[in-house]
């Protein structure tokens, strides 16, 4: 739930509330499927956005998650 899954998730806050480039964001993976290492993001663009903006926002969120520690408060909200 750090990137998607609830109102306080990073992509939800960034893409829907702050930048208003998406109407919905979600992610999923299927642990017991053939490609269990495949993680899927689903982003519904807003009418005024384009796919390049969405791709940039998604990539930036993943890079930030890789580089910066997750705060205790953010981890608590994600549970």
Image (tube, rainbow, N blue to C red):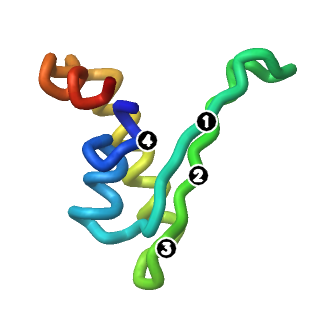
Q: N-terminal of the two: label 2 or label 4?
A: 4
- Measured in 3D between alpha carbons, the distance from the residue under mark 2 to the one under mark 4, in whole angstroms, is 11 Å
Q: Position of residue 14 (x, y in %)?
A: 27, 54
Q: Residue at x 34, y 59 (%)?
A: 15
* Secondary element at image label 4: loop
The residue wearing badge 1 is 28
Question: Is label 4 in contact with label 1 (beta carbons under 8 Å)?
Answer: no
Q: Which residue is mark 4?
A: 5
| Distance from the alpha carbon under mark 3 to that under mark 1 | 22 Å
User: Residue 2: x percent and y percent?
Assistant: 35, 31
In the depicted structure, whether residue 42 falls above or below residue 46: above
Distance from disc 2 to disc 1, alpha carbons, whole Å, reads 8 Å
Depth check: give the residue in front, 69 or 63: 69
Q: Are marks 2 and 1 in contact (CB under 8 Å)?
A: yes
> Mark 1 packing: few (<14 Cα in 10 Å), some, or many (20+)?
few
- Which numbered circle lies on residue 50? 3
Q: Is residue 59 left or right of residue 78?
A: right
Dot 1: what SS? strand
Decide if residue 71 is in sight here. yes
Label 3–label 1 contact, CB within 8 A: no
Q: Secondary structure at mark 2?
A: strand
Residue that numbered label 2 is attached to:
42
When asked about the image quadrant of residue 78, the answer is: top left
């Amino acid at each position: 739930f750090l990137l998607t899954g609830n109102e306080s998730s990073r992509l939800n806050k960034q893409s829907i509330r702050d930048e208003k480039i998406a109407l919905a964001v979600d992610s999923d993976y299927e642990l017991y499927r053939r490609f269990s290492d495949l993680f899927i993001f689903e982003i519904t663009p807003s009418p005024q956005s384009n796919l390049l903006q969405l791709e940039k926002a998604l990539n930036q969120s993943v890079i930030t998650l890789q580089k910066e520690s997750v705060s205790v408060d953010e981890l608590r909200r994600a549970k």
